[in-house]
Amino acid sequence: MAFGDFITVFLTLFAVIDILGSIPIILDLREKRGEIQSAKATLFAGILMLAFLFFGKAFLNMMGIDVESFALAGSIVIFIIGLEMILGINIFKAGPDNTGNHSIMPIAFPIIAGAGSLTTILSLKAEFDTLVIFAAIVSNLIIVYAVLKMSKFLQMKMGPSTLEILRRIFGVILLAISIKIFKANVNFVV
């Protein structure tokens, strides 16, 4: 496993998951609906991401979609997420929580393991080794769990302006990564 590849995949997933940028949403949910079960949310998100890592390609094949086409579509989704982060707009919106369990909906899905992160996993699989992606997912889940546990403390220490700066920096990183994924897969589809 190449360390440079791990860092690239880790940072890509970190930027897409954007757990630091989600702290305001998490705090709002905590205030409105009570305590969030950090372990449950992290575990469910991890199961979704790992299932997509190992079975996502088979699922796509069953639907007649090749990984390269999915990676191209994913690069566009990642590009839009990057634009959202930089411009401070919301193009993708989560649906209402009808389950009564806010640790799963909307924390685990779609905030942590949403369309962006699942698309990113398959997009990355077209370019990186599965073991590297697995290690990056697990590493990100550890950070997700820690942030969910310490979200109030982090908000007090970082402040809104620091969180906004981080969000915009990771937005630019996402734009660059989306263009790289697009360029790597466009020749296969055309």
Image: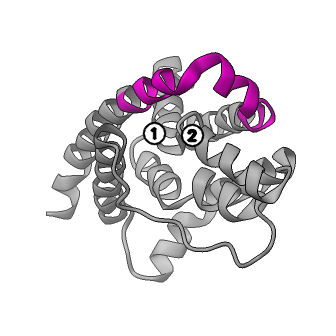
- Would you name the residue on which mark 1 appears? 128
Q: Amino acid at mark 2?
A: Ile
* Main secondary-structure element of the magenta-colored stretch: helix
Residue situated furthest bottom in the rendering:
63
Does the magenta segment cover residue 165? Answer: yes
Q: Nearer the viewer, residue 184 or 174?
A: 174
Q: Is residue 129 visible?
A: no
Relative image position of residue 121 (x, y in whole percent): 50, 50
Q: Quadrant of residue 155?
A: top right
Element under label 2? helix
Question: Which residue is drawn at the image coordinates 33% and 51% (left, top)?
Answer: 89
Relative image position of residue 127 (x, y in whole percent): 39, 43
- The answer to whether marks 1 and 2 mark residues whose Cβ atoms lie closer than 8 Å is yes
Relative image position of residue 120 (x, y in whole percent): 45, 50
* Quarter containing the N terminus: top right
User: Magenta segment, which residues?
Assistant: 145-168
* Quarter containing the C terminus: bottom left
Relative image position of residue 188 (x, y in whole percent): 22, 57
Q: Nearer the viewer, residue 71 or 144?
A: 144
Task: Count neighbours of disc 1 (C-alpha within 10 A) and say few if under 14, some if 14 to 19, many if 20 or more.
Answer: some
Q: Is residue 30 visible?
A: yes
Does the magenta segment cover residue 82? Answer: no
Q: Amino acid at mark 1?
A: Phe
Q: Answer above or below: position of 97 versus 182.
A: below
- Would you name the residue on which mark 2 appears? 133
Mark carried by residue 88 = none
Q: From the viewer's perspective, tell me whether residue 129 is left or right of residue 141.
A: left
Q: From the viewer's perspective, tell me whether residue 132 is left or right of residue 162.
A: right
